[in-house]
Image (spheres, coloured by chain):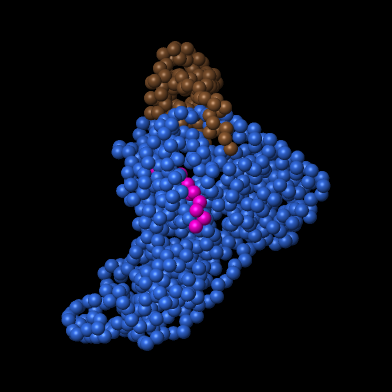
Chain colours: A blue, B brown
Amino acid sequence: MGKPENGVNRRNFLTVAAASGAAAVTAPTGSNEAKAVPSVARIAPPSAAEMEAEIGEARLLPAAVTSVGPNARPGSDFMVDVLRALDIEYVATNPASSCRGLHESINNYAMNKKPELLTATHEEIATAMAHGYAKVSNRPMGLLFHGTVGIQHATMAFYNAWADRAPMLIMSGNHLDAAHRPPGVPTTHAAQDPLALIRDFTKWDDQPQSLQACAEALFRAHKITMTPPYGPVAISLDAHLQEGFTENDLKIPKMTRVSAPSADMDALKEVARMLVDAQNPVIVVDRGARSHRFQPLLVELAQLLGAPVVDQLGRQNFPSRHPLNATDRARGVIGSADVILGLELADFWGIVNSYSDVAQPKQGRRLKDSVKLVSINSRDVFMKANYQDFQRFQDVDLALAADAEASLPGLIEMVKTASTPEHKAAAEKRTAAAGAAAAKNLEKLLSEDAVYGWDASPISTARLSAELWAAIKEHDWALVSRDARLSNWPHRMWNFDKHYHFIGDSGGAGQGYGLGAAVGAALAHREHKRLVVNVQGDGDMMYGPGGIWTAAHHNIPLLTVMHNNRAYHQEIMHVQRVGNWRDRGLGRANIGTTLEKPHINFAMMAKSMGVEGIGPIGDPKELAPALKRAVQIAKAGEPVLVDVLTQPR
Amino acid sequence: MMKMILSLAAGTILSSAAFAADAKRGQELFMKAGCYQCHGTVGQGANTGPRLGPEPLALESFISFVRNAASTNMPPYSAKILSDAEMADIHTYLASVPKPPARKDIPLLNSK
């Protein structure tokens, strides 16, 4: 090896660069941490002799990394400045060589603070974390993945986020330039159009070829992901931009404040007139709540109209104990409605029609012939063709392509203006009737449904939900998992009245969402010191159990309660159903659908990753003390898991 | 006509099957046939299927419904999959499930 130049040779480049560095320092834009930022080693290129000694006959490639002027700084440091200007708090990653430039800049330039790297053991988990985080914080998390294999790993989770309208900023590495990229694996992982794979279910993507274009692409991406309907956006950050240096005076754009698309006022006036004049107006809502503003608005509108609200629970849209909450009586109120207002519905057709999954499927209409249907839906503003998450077409009388949360204030004012004293009296009468029906329904549920199987083992979902409610209700709590698989008992028993109490489900129904989303949501709740509860399916858990380790590693408090029915339960029912249609029996429905022989011990799994694991618990009498202990651990700031053996649903 | 045949057949078989039914065997069949997947292991019901016990439909109606469930999302069970005698055993099992405690005796169901 030749004589080192400037005291640094190629073999100890990494060591020296990480430990000391030298030269080319530029303070982070808008940061007061410039003094804490280590400078970057300005390394002279290896001599021809050094190159030959190391790789044989060689020629120096004209890579940007070797062209270092006195004011040069790494391109990926500039990317950090851009992420800071975008107020990106976290970047979840599974490390990848094509992202090493930006990874190193976050570690050593940003000092792993705003953005902070979150280590995930799979890109699908990282993406689910961003998904859950966004639904609590109403802001995008950054993701940093390998360009080809990392994006491939994460693809299903992107689809969930797309279908669920969750914002996130996906960043991936690439080596586009075939003449300069490393051979072997980096070339195998390179692609001409690396984001083509996910273009059908992301809102926008780009592959900028200069640092200035990179800044503008990231800002455009941020604006697009945060404009309703929210959705993932992706930027391919080529390795030559990350690892290259720049001396140019680059400009970071200013933050764009986004106004959500609200409905046309004339159209809202017409909707208000239809609702006010209706005898039985009904509101159906799905992904209505983007922020804390939505729920109070919907309560005000429902009360003005005396309109029962059917909550599809895509978000925390409406208080669970409000007298106008008719979620458990959906079929009845929809069937008797004369005007239905659908807010951000994922599937309007499925709400007003029936479909029987029998050998010869049957379809039917649930509505009165005279019913008027109105839709306010931001998905009408932006839609793509291939994947069918937009569901079957439902003809409506008036479709407002607009964001519901942004449109409700205008609609409320229009309803107030249109309402006469007679209208108000009728609304009060409807509210009273709905309240009485809701109370009667709840009494039936608790007296006639919840009590059956109360002492059963495996533990009934009603018992589990009641025990869990008793354990958490005195705390400031949040449920970060869907409750449909618990036969909806939480939304029947618990008092969901704050916007952060619930975040809906995966959107795309892709398994592997649950734990990752819970960890991301819990991270967003952490600063508020909330008690975060994740009721976790066993099948879903096995897609990405590494989320347990991430929660432990990053000190994210989270109470995970296993809904361990030892099966892909829904799939058992499907196989059973077809077996019956074909009259071939049910004896083998468990093949390929159950998680038995051996049973999975989730408490041991948690312990193996540094998380306290309790259980498995099959005796309902043991549940209360286990949950009490688990709540204490979570309130102390740590993740904890309770494995509960449950009834299927 | 078909309904009549089924009804007559059920009536004939039930009188003998009901006597012979064994709740334990019925429980095993309830699990083996996968009834518990939608209705719970003690027939308590869920959002996937209604409650079946401890006061099930009359046996004749019970069998008729299970055989002719095509009008619902429930898959029909033919006699090839579950014989009338086996259905009677399951019925006996469901009838044998202890009655649950009353809501008033469960503090968790009376708290806010």
Seen at 59% across and 69% down, the residue is: A257
Q: Quadrant of the N terminus of chain A?
A: bottom left
Q: Is residue A173 above or below residue A482?
A: below
**A534 and A152: which is toward the camera:** A534
Q: Which residues are magenta?
A: A527-540
Q: Residue furthest right?
A: A421
Q: Is residue A417 magenta?
A: no
| Picture quadrant of residue A117 | bottom left
Q: Is residue A200 above or below residue A463?
A: below
Q: Is residue A531 magenta?
A: yes
Image spot of residue A507 (x, y percent): 50, 52
Using the rendered image of the protein, determine whether residue A93 is visible from the camera's viewpoint: yes
Seen at 39% across and 33% down, the residue is: A618
Image spot of residue A637 (x, y percent): 43, 52
**B78 and A499: which is toward the camera:** A499
Seen at 35% across and 34% down, the residue is: A588
Q: Is residue A148 left or right of residue A481?
A: left
| Picture quadrant of residue A366 | top right
Q: Is residue B93 above or below residue A248?
A: above
Q: Is residue A547 left or right of residue A489?
A: left
Using the rendered image of the protein, determine whether residue A195 is visible from the camera's viewpoint: no
Image spot of residue A21 (x, y percent): 32, 78
Seen at 66% across and 41% down, the residue is: A323
**A84 and A414: which is toward the camera:** A84
Q: Is residue A417 above or below residue A648?
A: below
